Structures are given as structure tokens and as C-alpha cells.
Image: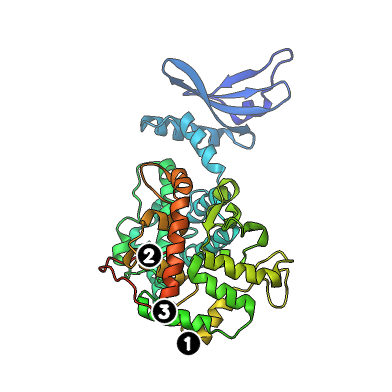
Amino acid sequence: MLTDLQCKNFTCPPGRKRARITDAQGLYLEASPAGSKRWFWKTYADGKEGRLALGSYPAVSLTAARKARDAAKLQKAAGVDPVEGRRRDRLKGQREGGETFRAVALEWHARQLENWSPEHANRTLRQLERDLFPWLGDRDMASIEPMELLAVLQKVEERGALETADRGLMLARQVYEYWLPTADREQRNITEGLKKRLTPYRGKHFAAILEPDRFGELLRAMYAYKGGPIVRTALLLAPILFQRPGNLRMMEWAEVDLDRALWTIPSAKMKRGVQEKANGEPHIVPMPSQAVALLRELHALTGAGRYVFPGQRDHDRPLSDNSVRSALYGLNFGKEQSWHGFRASARTMLVDQLDLDPLAIEANLAHAVRDANGRSYNRTQYLAKRFEQIQQWADYLDKLRQGADVIQFPERARSGAG
């Protein structure tokens, strides 16, 4: 058994790479020629000798080294390899904050940044910091109970933010799914089943007119719009092309080929993940003759600039998001029909009234088309069909606007468009 004095006076003799003095039960102190001293505990696994580092002397005293040896022995007796446990602890130590909900959530969040837009990343982080971290941030992941998380989410519900509570549960679920594969022992995902305990939330749909007669009234009001030609053209193109408002108002003349009746939206402008924005294919929008005519007329006014629909005050910026919305309210249709809602209107009537191919419709909407041939097949093979379809749609809108009789197909289940 060693004494404190022996440990203090122990040095490595000249000419040797290292020297050891033993204590008891596998504990020994090793000295180097440079004068450093370190504690080790001798281990055996699969017939091979190994060792577990217990710290440097004198920072770790003889008494402390013996306690560390005894703790390692207990760990080994419980069936846990102390060397492997130490390695695992070092890996965990790389996560700043350890195994707290905040530390794991921030690590998960950082891993997603490559595939998220900056806006989505910031919105997610703000919700974590506002709704989850104040109550769960400093808690160890393994110690949080389902009812605690539920109580936190119900606090969000109490302020009337049902959608935010639903999203908070989704974020917590993703954090737990990220953490569970590396948890010390088998743990359950505490988010399972909690959705049933929250107030049911149904996503809000954009206001959209789905009845042909009423939509015809809207079209007549739009064509009678007395505002400026830029907003008027955007307003009239919205139902014909039924693309997302952001894409339409940021349309550039460089993206438009009027002779071929094609609008090519770059992937970077589409509603996609960061990677797909950078590497994805552009969205090609076939245009009917009515849309081409409207754009040719507007080209005389804005064709010298970048944007098809430049802002009224700053022509180097696109039309504001509020422009068409304000026009619809000015026509007394704002509560019934939103700008984005033209997509739902088109999606519904193209199927219910014109009985057209849903796959081609989804391709026009820039939704992922899933069939046996794959998405790239649909983008190419459906283009001819989409040209035919979009022209039928524009002609149908003309008939609605003129009040002509249209063929009424049997009612089908109606679905919105995102």
C-alpha cells in the first residue's frame, strides 16, 4: 500500500521511458521522464490487459485515486466496461450542456441548418426558446415525464395558440427521435400519444371560391378593376396560372419566353428545402394564349426592367405581397378569395368541372407527383398535356366570366392546394 510521501517523492529514473509504483487491487502510479505522474487502474478484458486512466497526481490524490478505482470496480461488477463507459462519457462531453433538453435540441437544430431555409431555422429556434426551453431546457432528457411536456404545451394552448402547441409537440418529438439512439439505456419517446391530449387543431385553409357561378362573378369584378396596369395584370394572371403568390409577384422577364409560351421558375425560388433549391430542377409553367396576351401588353410598360411586376415606388423590387390582396378586398371579395386561394379554386374546378388529369394538375401546381414512373418522368411527359390542360382552363374561365353555360360534372371530394 502506498503512502502520500511515496507518491510525492516518486520519480522516473534516468534512462527509462516510464516507471510505476503499485498500490493495491490494480491501482498504480506511473511517472514519465518529464516529471508528470498519472494514476491508472489495471483492467482485463478477453484475456488482454488494459488500463483505465484515473487522473494526474497531485491533482488526484492517493485517496481520490482509490475511490475512483473502487467506483470503476463497482461499475465492472454491474456488467459495464469502465473503459467503454469512460469513452462514452467523453463523447457525451462533446455536447455542450450535456444531456439537457436544451443541449440536445440545439444540437438537433444545428444539424438541420444545411437543409432548412434561414427563415424556417429562425422560426424554429424562436419557438424552442419561447415555448419549451423556459420549462424544460435545463432538465435532463431522461428525467422529463410525458405529463410535464403536456403541461408545457397546454400553457401554449391557454393563450389560444393551438397551431403553435401542435407544432411545439412536433418539435419535441423530433428532438427525442434525434436523442433516443444515443441514450444510455432504453428510453421511450415521451411525445407518443400526447397529440390526443391536445385540443384538436385543423390547419387553416386559404379562402377560396369553389363554385363556378360565384367564381364567374369574381372574374367579372376583376376584369372591371380600375387600379394600375401592373396590379391589374397580376390580378388577372393569378387565377389563370394558379402559381404561388411569391412566384408570380417575383416573376422576371428573363424567366419568360412569350414565343414559346413558357415561364421557367428557377429552383431557388421554389418552395423547397435548401438542398433542393440549390440542386433541383426549375419549375416549368406552360401559359395559355390569354396569359401570353396579358404579358405582351404589360411588356410595353415594364419590359425594360428586371421584374414583370415591379413595385410602385421602387422598380428594382417586386410587387408587394399585399398588392393583389388589397385589390381583392377593394372588389369586396377579399374574405371569400385569397391570392393563394386561386390554387385551391383551380385544383377543385379542374377536376370537378372539367374532369382533367389530376397528375397533370399536380405538376402544374408544382406538387411532387408520385406514380410508378417517378417525378422526373412526370415533369417531362406531362408538359404537352399540361399545355392542353392550361388552355382548357383559361377558356373555361373566359366562359365563366362571360356567364356562358358550362358543363357541370358530378360532385367529387374537393381538396385544397398548398
Of mark 1 and mark 2, the one earlier in the sequence is 1
Q: Earlier in the sequence, mark 1 or mark 3?
A: 3
Q: CA distance from mark 1 to mark 3?
A: 14 Å
SS type, badge 3: helix
- Position in image of residue 287 (x %, y %): 53, 61
Q: How many neighbours does mark 1 have within 10 angstroms: few (below 14), some (14-19), or many (20 or more)?
A: few
Viewer-nearest residue: 60 or 232: 232
- Inspect the image, locate mark 2, and give the three-letter code of the amino acid beneath it: Leu
SS of the residue under disc 2: helix
Tell me the colour scheme of the image.
rainbow
Helix, strand or loop at label 1? It is loop
Quadrant the C terminus occupies: bottom left
Looking at marks 2 and 3 on the same chain, the residue that comes earlier in the sequence is marked by 3
Q: Is residue 236 left or right of residue 172?
A: right
Q: In the picture shown, does residue 293 fall above or below 226?
A: above
Residue at (58, 68) in percent of width and height: 293
* Residue type indicated by callout 3: Gly
- Between residue 17 and residue 380, name the one nearer to us: 380
- Name the residue beneath numbered marker 2: 350
Indicate which disc residue 173 carries.
none
The single residue placed furthest to the top in the displayed view is: 15
Give the residue number, with chain letter if any, for mark 3: 216
Q: Residues within 10 Å of mark 3 (few under 14, many from 20)?
A: many
Residue 218 seen in render: yes
Q: Position of residue 37 (x, y in %)?
A: 65, 27
* Residue tagged 1: 332
Is there a contact, CB below 8 Å, between mark 1 and mark 3? no
Residue furthest out toward the left: 410
- Which sits in the foreground, 389 or 126? 389
Question: How busy is the neighbourhood of tag 2: few (under 14 within 10 Å), some, or many (20 plus)?
Answer: many
